[in-house]
Amino acid sequence: MGEAVHPANTAIPHDHAEEVELYHPHSWWTRYVFSQDAKVIGVQYSLTAIGIGLVALVLSWLMRLQLGFPGTFDFIDPPAYYQFITMHGMIMVVYLLTALFLGGFGNYLIPLMLGARDMVFPYVNMLSYWVYVLAVLVLVASFFAPGGPTGAGWTLYPPQAILSGTPGGQDWGIILMLLSLALFIIGFTMGGLNYVVTVLQARTRGMTLMRMPLTIWGIFTATVMALLAFPALFVGAVMMLLDRLLGTSFFMPSLVEMGQQLKYGGGSPILFQHLFWFFGHPEVYIVALPAFGIVSDLIATHARRNIFGYRMMVWAIVAIGALSFVVWAHHMYVSGMNPYFGFFFATTTLIIAIPTAIKVYNWLLTLWRGDIHLNVPMLFALGFIVTFVNGGLTGLFLGNVVVDVPLSDTMFVVAHFHMVMGVAPIMVIYGGIYHWYPKITGRMLDETMGKIHFWVTFLGAYLIFFPMHYLGLLGVPRRYHDIGQAAFVPDSAHTLNAFISVVALVVGAAQMLFLFNLAWSLRRGRQAGPNPWGATTLEWQTPETPPGHGNFGPELPVVHRWAYDYSVPGAARDFIPQNEPDPAGRAA
Amino acid sequence: MIVTLAVFAGLAAVAAWWLVQQGLAEKPWLGTQPAAELVAPGTPRLPTAKIGLGIFLAVAGLLLSLIVSSYVMRMEMADWRPLPRPALLWANTGVLVLSSLALHWAVRAARRGDRAGVQDGMVMGGLTALLFLAGQFLAWRQLSAAGYRPATGPADAFFYLITAVHGLHLLGGLVALGRAGVKLARGAPMHVLRLSVELCATYWHFLLLAWLCLFAVLAYAPSVTAFLALCIAPFR
Amino acid sequence: MAVALILLVIALGSVVFHWLSPWWWTPIASNWHYIDTTLIITFWITGIAFVAVVGFLAWCVYRYRHRPGQKAHYEPENKRLELWLTAATALGVAAMLAPGLFVWSQFVTVPRDATEIEVVGRQWQWSYRLPGKDGRLGTSDVRLISDGNPLGLNPDDPAGHDDVVVENDDLHLPVGRPVKVLLRAVDVLHDFYVPEFRAKMDMIPGSVTYFWFTPIRTGRFEALCAELCGTGHPMMRGGVQVQTEAEYQAWLQGQQTFAQLAAR
């Protein structure tokens, strides 16, 4: 870089910045429905993801009703229960978290934070959203198909996933599930190419990689990972689909089902597990890295302090991204794979704890000696730290191969991954929505409702999942429709289950308050102004709020500093926007 | 998963090489940076579309490597029964090489500004690609007539899967080539046309390389594995 | 203020809950004390880390909350501090990983004198096979399964003729003798899970997996399935009776061998 040298603060010739030809909408349809504007697409992605997420929330209620009060609800029979857990898991992980972080936050924030007018391939971006919608529709269709949706568990392990002992295995359920996943991946790949190439090509002048906000680093790295991880799921889904439809035997060995010899033979069930987790583990970080990035910016902004150890934060994101591709088999310690793999994967898994811990320390050290404004986004950030640290630490149990042996497939695992990739990222999503809602709509979300929403959600989620670890320690297996009578399960465990279920209903209800707040504040929220939080990053410096088509008016902003100039000694205000020129002689 | 990890390591090396050049060690909070950096670091040296294609090829390459990985993992199991390779596959390989060469010809013509040459190259490339697909389909017919169907056994299933995935990628390429053809017919300016043709050619070369690798794995990997097994046998 | 207090309550409350929890692992019945020990080490290290992190968080929220005149300290990084923290974390991780790998090497090394037995899973019941007098299990194949041969034993393999096939009964094991449990499934994935033994492993149709342990006390222990295997998954129960050598032999005398079953 730097082929041409310009004296600082002089006009920069126009031919250096590539002005993108913007697509201009001509009608209401192309402006709001088939829009090619990344901001609109981001909102569309978010609303669709939240919509399908509500379905998953209701499913979790039904599951908790069954677990807390077994035998009370006749319609939740075992097939229905397994369909509920499968759909709940799949929707939450793929159709909600992945779509919301990358499709929602990614689309909205990447161009704005980088000082770009839009994504580099707007048409492909629009297609990406509509293919995602199609994937969601196919998924929803499986609820109404004969036999209902698949009940194979979100991991869809063969052979069981396509056999008759599993709901949807010999009906439409599994077929629609696999088709929907394949569609999702195709749609995501279109979007993902956009996000990556936009970060590579469309940054505004002065926006070096090391001046990018950590949000962008998180989303960027996660997108690269997703582009490389999703093909594994795609291959697995296609192969299983062929096994189911054409009778091939990729994953199907010779087997006898209910006394019947099946035609399959020679396939390897564990091959699917390798493919699934080669996707599945990076997937955890595909959700976590954008959360890491966003929460870093929330903490810095609302503690009015530069993010501590920015470079370490960037390096840690990249290191976690790379390492997460060589830890997949820690989900398979008791899967019957070659047990000697355990040594390698336990070591890589525990090594990944180190960059992750560094990130936690740096969040804490950012708060330390800060000026902490305890508004709603900051509260959610604190909630994230607590739940993420809790979930991360229990990950050290499960990553350490021998400790995993007694705990795997128990409620301990359920509690762990809900804490670390359920509750923690959702805390960040909420924090992010409270933080950026004013930019998206021009109005603030209601603070009181926000605080109630936070406390019920955070404390409730902790009360649900923290005690749940101890059920797992006791030995209660996961994916049990009803634990029933077992000598080692005391009555108190059933009481705990009922307690968890009640709290889960309350926490779920609190989300309705959030949805109400979203709708209510749209018209009645306080006017926000362009930069209500006093933030430094470019999306808060747009000439209009909400930002107009093309984001930045006639001239793109020029970046003069990093994203974290908060409380700089000697500065007039406690923040300096990234596009504010540098007065000579600033104290370094 | 060795094959996939090798491909992944290659991609990671490229990413690391690129990252190292981005000044990841600089301290962005330090005062005024050299004025040079006010020039957009993203001042494109490569057209955006080419970078997009490059990343897509990385994804497609990883996808194919995952299938090959699965194939190799399955092949190592004791009951592997390979299926015969129709001689037709050799002819198809030759046709695909011709197709790639034709698009290379079109790129050279575009660089010279020779519209007629571009047209010849694109038509030739498209037709040979179609011929390749027809040949692959014929190979399927031959095999299934001889009793090797997808459900016959894992080796057969993998053969059909691998050729189908590769063929679908080529079909996608033909759509892109068709769009470039429309641009040519409508008299698009040469620099626009040249970019389209270059993108198509890159994709074609990738698919040729991919096919050569896949063909080598399909045709020779069983004997390589058998050979290795023979070598190890005395030491067991 | 209230926020800091609540955070502190979460940190300390979690520890109190841990100590007072009536839900704790089942009394161990196998040789895998080491697994429990590793778990306890992990609890200590992660517990200290959790209280330290959340406690520090609570203190920061209290001490540096926004007040008039409060101004954040501008400090981009502190190499020394970050290095120290990294080193301390690495040490903690090593302290968990090292014993973990040590115990895992024992877990994967089956003692030479271990008796091979077989557990077979199918939707949704367990069957067992014990070696006969020759101490060896015969070969088997899923394709040989029929009504008279539910486990698919190979009738041409003489080693299998004296194998004891146990259906509709508990698995019986003599106390104090190491066993290598060979695991086989005929339809889908299952996982033979006895909480008191700590050890478990998935069974995969098409291949044979294993784990080993030594039962150390007598009694009956419940066996469950720990890998989702269809709608009957929670109902897939079995039992293991660990007996003294004399009791075990007495029970064994009453069992039928594969040859006897086939002759019927």
Image: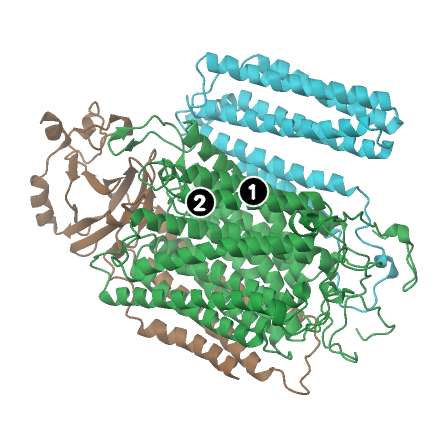
Chain colours: A green, B cyan, C brown
Q: Residues within 10 Å of mark 1 (few under 14, many from 20)?
A: many
Furthest residue to the front?
A27
Q: Residue A185's mark?
A: 1
Q: Residue A341's mark?
A: 2
Furthest residue to the bottom?
C68
Report the residue at 65% width, 60% height from top. A215
Report the residue at 92% width, 62% height from top. A10
Q: Quarter of the image for the C terminus of chain A: give it.
A: bottom right
Q: In this rendering, is residue A384 above or below A304? A: above
Residue type, numbered disc 1:
Ile
Q: Mark 2 or mark 1: which comes first in sequence?
A: 1
Counting from the top left corner in percent of width and height, residue A69 is at: 28, 61
Q: Is residue A152 among the parts visible in the rendering?
A: yes
Counting from the top left corner in percent of width and height, residue C90 is at: 53, 63
Q: Quadrant of residue A439?
A: bottom right
Q: In this rendering, is residue B70 above or below A208? A: above
Q: Which subunit holds the residue at mark 2?
A: A
Q: Is residue B25 among the parts visible in the rendering?
A: no
Q: Quadrant of residue B173?
A: top right
Apparent side of residue A172 relative to residue A298 in the rendered image (left or right) = left
Q: In this rendering, is residue A106 above or below B83? A: below
Apparent side of residue A345 relative to residue A404 in the rendered image (left or right) = right
Q: How crowded is mark 2: few (under 14 residues within 10 Å), some or many (20 or more)?
A: some
Closest to the observer, B95 or B79: B95
Closest to the observer, A128 or B71: A128
Apparent side of residue A556 relative to residue A260 in the rendered image (left or right) = right
Residue type, numbered disc 2:
Phe
Report the residue at 62% width, 50% height from top. A223
Q: In this rendering, is residue A332 above or below A314? A: above
* Distance between the alpha carbons at the discs numbered 2 and 1: 29 Å
